[in-house]
Image (cartoon, rainbow, N blue to C red):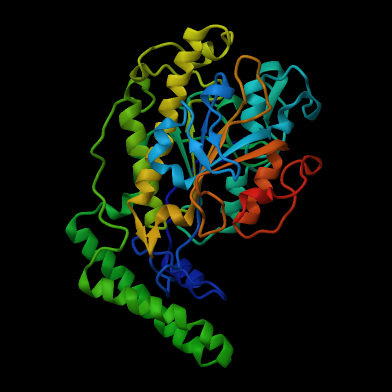
């Protein structure tokens, strides 16, 4: 089996640049330092998708996870686990009653497949595992994940197709218990734990000495001059209607010229070399620093329109993390299999889940720091927190904990709302995401597990 390579920085030759920029219907110039190209009107910002995952379900969900809401579904009190999200309450959509039907045995080629692997493979693909050489003869997933499906729809609009960010995601073990994201059947895309590698992938070409930056600007100015000449020649041969379609492009050129001539930085801001360093990006004891660094640069990448799709994976399937910063050093996975009656273990699990909720809050906080039009980046985005299980000690696939944030330009009902779904298939959530991003498709993954979009989630 051939694994897909991780994302790499995209380099354009002059010929590739000109070809892409003058293609029919293409409005972006693919200059990574200039994310505002193609935005002719204030407030015309791209939509983004961020999916964060954690493992092992949640302990005693009825009391530690489920929120309190009034008769209209507005949240009146967050739960113990979700309490770190209090500052973002008005941006949340908390789901209850969403079932991972694809994880149940009748959808798998073997009933003995491990529960965590099933859940991890199915939560974003809506499809089961295949046979293979891992535990219980299991293999990788059998279909594309929703993040990659959408990234493919937007292919070529940003320099980076998508980001897969790992936080102690055990990349050194290329197994199905580590694979959340899939480019297709048997094509896992593993998360990148090393923040320095990720930083270079996103911003490497911008971290230059002054002389190098001057040379870079001159090269880009030269390309623009040729591009304008090329478009002038095209303009002589097209209809009035087609000419009108190029007006936005000409506007973008003028804006770009002003930036290049003035030596200004783009609206996405300046970027410095990493200030956080570690010899081991998979060190659980440094999770605070590594996660802050990774999540912040992910948001900056989206602010610069380097990419519009990202996943953030905390730990592997099994979630075998030991996070001492929460007040204990017990294994998350081991605790998740303790009995409901073991209150000490359940309390420790709550602390671990609260920590991840705080990391979700970090993403929202960073997005709110980026102004866009009359709002912030979060208003143009959708951020989703998923889990591979509903409950860990019985590998339950019912009632998967899901939190969403960001109204996606008014498309989503993320306004402090709690929605009880009554055993709706998680495949329908994936279909709902398609509709939210403008694709009116009514199945994703196993078609028989789809009934259509969840209309309560859409504005």
Q: Is residue 105 visible?
A: yes
Residue at horizontal 23 percent and vertical 67 percent from the top: 264
245 to 274, vertically: above or below: below
196 to 108, vertically: above or below: below
* Count of number-bearing discs: 0
Residue at horizontal 69 percent and vertical 32 percent from the top: 100
Residue at horizontal 50 percent and vertical 62 percent from the top: 157
- Residue 375, image quadrant: bottom left
Q: In the picture provided, is 391 more to the left or to the right than 11? A: right
Q: Position of residue 405 (x, y in %)?
A: 49, 45
Q: In the picture provided, is 48 more to the left or to the right than 42? A: right
Q: In the picture provided, is 392 more to the left or to the right than 408? A: right
Between residue 260 and residue 147, name the one nearer to us. Answer: 147
Residue at horizontal 41 percent and vertical 78 percent from the top: 227
Between residue 375 and residue 298, name the one nearer to us. Answer: 375
Q: Position of residue 387 (x, y in %)?
A: 57, 30
Residue furthest left in the image: 210
The C terminus sits in image quarter: bottom right
Q: In the picture provided, is 449 more to the left or to the right than 293? A: right
Between residue 92 and residue 312, name the one nearer to us. Answer: 92
Q: Position of residue 52 (x, y in %)?
A: 50, 37
Q: Is residue 201 visible?
A: no
Q: Position of residue 188 (x, y in %)?
A: 60, 36
The N terminus sits in image quarter: top right
- Residue 394, image quadrant: top right
194 to 138, vertically: above or below: below
């Amino acid at each position: 089996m051939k694994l897909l390579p991780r994302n790499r920085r995209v380099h354009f030759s002059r010929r590739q640049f000109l070809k892409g920029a003058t293609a029919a219907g293409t409005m972006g110039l693919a200059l990574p330092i200039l994310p505002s190209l193609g935005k002719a009107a204030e407030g015309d910002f791209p939509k983004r998708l961020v999916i964060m995952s954690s493992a092992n379900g949640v302990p005693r969900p009825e009391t530690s996870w489920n929120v309190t809401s009034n008769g209209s579904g507005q949240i009146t009190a967050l739960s113990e686990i979700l309490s770190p999200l209090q500052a973002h309450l008005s941006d949340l959509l908390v789901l209850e009653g969403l079932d991972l039907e694809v994880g149940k045995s009748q959808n798998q080629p073997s009933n003995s497949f491990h529960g965590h692997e099933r859940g991890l493979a199915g939560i974003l693909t809506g499809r089961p595992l295949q046979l293979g050489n891992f535990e219980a003869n299991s293999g990788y997933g059998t279909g594309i994940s929703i993040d990659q499906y959408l990234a493919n729809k937007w292919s070529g609009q940003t320099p980076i197709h998508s980001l897969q960010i790992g936080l102690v995601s055990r990349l050194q073990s290329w197994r199905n218990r580590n694979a959340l994201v899939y480019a297709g059947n048997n094509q896992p895309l593993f998360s990148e734990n090393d923040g320095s590698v990720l930083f270079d992938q996103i911003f490497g070409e911008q971290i230059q000495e002054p002389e190098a930056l001057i040379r870079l600007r001159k090269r880009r100015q030269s390309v623009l001059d040729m591009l304008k000449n090329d478009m002038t020649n095209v303009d002589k041969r097209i209809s009035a209607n087609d000419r009108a379609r190029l007006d936005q492009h000409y506007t973008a050129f003028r804006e770009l010229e002003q930036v290049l001539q003035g030596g200004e930085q783009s609206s996405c801001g300046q970027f410095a070399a990493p200030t956080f360093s570690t010899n081991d990006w998979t060190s659980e004891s440094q999770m605070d620093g590594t996660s802050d660094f990774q999540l912040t640069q992910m948001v900056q990448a989206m602010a610069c329109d380097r990419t519009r799709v990202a996943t953030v994976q905390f730990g592997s399937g099994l979630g075998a993390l030991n996070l001492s910063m929460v007040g204990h050093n017990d294994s998350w996975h081991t605790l998740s299999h303790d009995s409901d009656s073991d209150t000490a273990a359940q309390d420790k699990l709550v602390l671990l889940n609260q920590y991840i909720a705080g990391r979700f809050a970090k993403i929202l906080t960073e997005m709110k720091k980026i102004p866009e039009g009359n709002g912030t980046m979060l208003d143009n985005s959708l951020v989703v927190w998923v889990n591979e299980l509903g409950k860990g000690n019985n590998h339950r696939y019912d009632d998967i904990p899901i939190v969403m944030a960001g109204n996606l330009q008014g498309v989503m009902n993320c306004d402090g709302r709690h929605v009880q779904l009554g055993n709706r298939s998680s495949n329908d959530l994936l279909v709902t995401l398609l509709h939210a991003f403008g694709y009116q498709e009514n199945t994703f993954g196993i078609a028989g597990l789809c009934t259509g979009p969840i209309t309560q989630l859409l504005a």
